[in-house]
Image (spheres, rainbow, N blue to C red):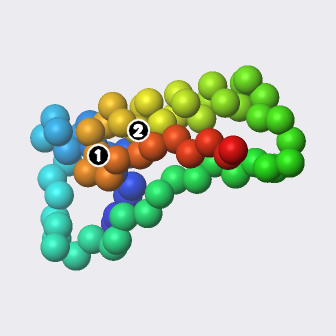
Amino acid sequence: MQLPNHYVAPAIKSGELVELLADYQPPAEGIWALYPHNRHLSTKVSLLIERINQKLQETDMTTEYKAHKQP
């Protein structure tokens, strides 16, 4: 079974889980927040996206996540 790194990173760090077949991992994919581009992004949604981004970075994953803001 494969789970996203942000689900299992703390358990792997603590030794609760052990990574097997590390050479057979699928390519990394991003996590996307989709919203209508023609509307003003509410403060609540903006803060939620920032919080999710912060938590993903705290898991010390190999992929760097950056918030993408529409112009």
Choose between 62 and 14: the one closer to the eye: 62
Residue 28 spot, x, y in % from top left: 36, 64
Do residues under tags 2 and 1 come within 8 Å of each other at their CB atoms? Answer: yes
Q: In this rendering, is residue 6 above or below 26?
A: above
Visible in this render: residue 21? Answer: yes
Q: Can residue 16 be seen here?
A: no
Question: In the rendered view, would you say 1 is above or below 61?
Answer: below
Q: CA distance from mark 2 to mark 1?
A: 7 Å
User: Which image quadrant: the N terminus?
Assistant: bottom left
- In the drawing, does residue 42 fall left or right of residue 9? right
* Residue 69 figure quarter: top right
Q: Amino acid at mark 1?
A: Met
Residue placed most toward the observer, 41 or 23: 41
Residue drawn at x 79%, y 50% is: 37
Q: Is residue 27 left or right of residue 21?
A: right
Identify the residue position indicated by label 1 in the image: 61
Above or below — where is 56 with respect to 29? Answer: above
Local crowd size for mark 1, using a 10 Å CA cut-off: few (<14), some (14–19), many (≥20): few
| Residue type at numbered disc 2 | Leu
Element marked by disc 1: loop
Dot placed on the residue nearer the N-terminal end, 2 or 1:
2
Residue marked by disc 2: 56
At x 58%, y 53%, the residue is: 32
Q: Residue at x 34, y 71 (%)?
A: 27
Q: Count neighbours of disc 2 (C-alpha within 10 A) and say few if under 14, some if 14 to 19, many if 20 or more.
A: some
Q: Viewed as shown, does residue 54 lie left or right of 47?
A: left
